[in-house]
Image: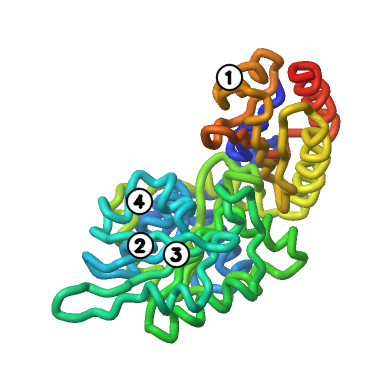
């Protein structure tokens, strides 16, 4: 089976399993797990922030950030297709009592003009705009690597209005690799950023939320509130440290995605977007089949992909899929739809 559903399906390698076995541990709620502390320090340094907090998932990291940055009832500005809007079960409303003002954007980032137009001033009748949430890479828009200039321009427009900025950077290392820039060039303009260790980097569990010291101290309390306080978490943080050594491997994932896209473009009925990172989106309406039927036919040929809309199938490359696997997958897909 060639699993191209997501980069979340990766299995921990031998080094990660050994790191889990030998991790020095303590009670992380007391701040006494040395492996967690090391992981937090490493990620904070990597993204150029003062401090960081290990959390069970990227969704929890985003939800904590929203809770810390805002007051109840405020509005969040976010792209209509962003992860926090489309894939987090309305968490901003449920966990932080926020309203989300969704924007139709170019490449997933609102322009300064859009931010100015959609910003709401707090007054007697309205709670005002409390947060701008960005995403890089942008999952639903095909793994777009958003250039630092767009991030910086949006963040500056928000900051001019005293609105904090959170970056859902689940795949921010992919973005930096694709753009050939330091991660800090992307993350410096924002107030907080969440980074996933269990996607392309291959760790089994966890994300890290980073910001300044005061933000992280408040985030620690919210993590506890949401049930994310962990005890001897070094057992899962150890593999996270190993995962940080895998950043350079993301380039191979991007190359494999390009090879996959090139091959899929020759399959009858497939209209493929040019990938920028490790996500390939294919419009399959030309096959005359529903998305579910296409995915099922692929499954029957031992290729796993994801339904990503009424006429879109998503393929995602990762460290557990080799170039040879891509070649075999293309053979099976081509044979299925010729």
Instruction: Give the SS element for disc 2.
Output: strand
Instruction: Give the SS element for disc 1.
Output: helix
Mark nearest the camera among 1 and 3 is: 1
State whether residue 250 is above or below residue 120: above
Residue nearest the observer in this picture, 136 or 195 = 136
Residue at 50% x, 64% y: name it. 134
Residue 133, labelled with which disc? Answer: 3
Mark nearest the camera among 4 and 3 is: 3
- Give percent across and percent down for residue 150: 60, 72
* Labelled pair 2, 1 in contact (Cβ < 8 Å): no
**Residue under pointer 4:** 229
**Residue under pointer 2:** 101
**Residue under pointer 1:** 293
Mark nearest the camera among 2 and 4 is: 2
Quarter of the figure that contains the N terminus: top right
Residue nearest the observer in this picture, 73 or 214 = 73
């Amino acid at each position: 089976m060639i699993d191209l559903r997501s980069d979340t399906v990766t299995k921990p390698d031998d080094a990660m399993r050994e790191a889990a076995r030998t991790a020095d541990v303590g009670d992380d709620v007391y701040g006494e797990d040395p492996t967690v502390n090391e992981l937090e320090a490493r990620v904070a340094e990597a993204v150029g922030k003062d401090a960081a907090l290990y959390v069970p998932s990227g969704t929890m990291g985003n939800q904590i950030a929203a809770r810390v940055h805002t007051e109840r009832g405020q509005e969040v500005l976010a792209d209509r297709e962003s992860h926090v809007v489309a894939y987090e079960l309305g968490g901003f409303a449920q966990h932080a009592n926020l309203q989300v003002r969704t924007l139709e954007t170019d490449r997933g980032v609102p322009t300064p003009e859009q931010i100015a137009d959609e910003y709401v001033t707090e007054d007697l009748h309205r709670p005002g705009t409390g947060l701008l949430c960005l995403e890089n890479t942008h999952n639903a828009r095909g793994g777009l690597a958003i250039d630092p200039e767009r991030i910086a321009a949006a963040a500056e427009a928000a900051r001019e209005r005293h609105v904090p900025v959170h970056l859902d950077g689940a795949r921010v290392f992919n973005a930096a690799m694709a753009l050939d820039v330091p991660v800090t060039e992307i993350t410096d303009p924002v107030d907080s950023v969440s980074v996933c260790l269990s996607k392309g980097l291959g760790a089994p569990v966890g994300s890290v939320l980073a910001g300044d010291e005061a933000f992280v101290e408040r985030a620690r309390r919210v993590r506890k509130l949401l049930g994310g306080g962990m005890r001897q978490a070094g057992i899962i943080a150890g593999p996270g440290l190993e995962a940080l050594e895998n950043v350079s491997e993301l380039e191979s994932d991007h190359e494999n995605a390009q090879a996959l896209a090139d091959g899929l473009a020759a399959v009858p009925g497939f209209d493929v977007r040019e990938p920028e990172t490790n996500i390939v989106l294919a419009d399959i309406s030309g096959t005359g089949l529903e998305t579910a039927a296409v995915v099922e036919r692929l499954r029957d040929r031992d290729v796993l992909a994801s339904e990503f809309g009424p006429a879109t199938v998503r393929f995602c490359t990762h460290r557990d899929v080799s170039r040879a696997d891509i070649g075999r997958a293309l053979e099976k897909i081509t044979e299925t739809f010729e």
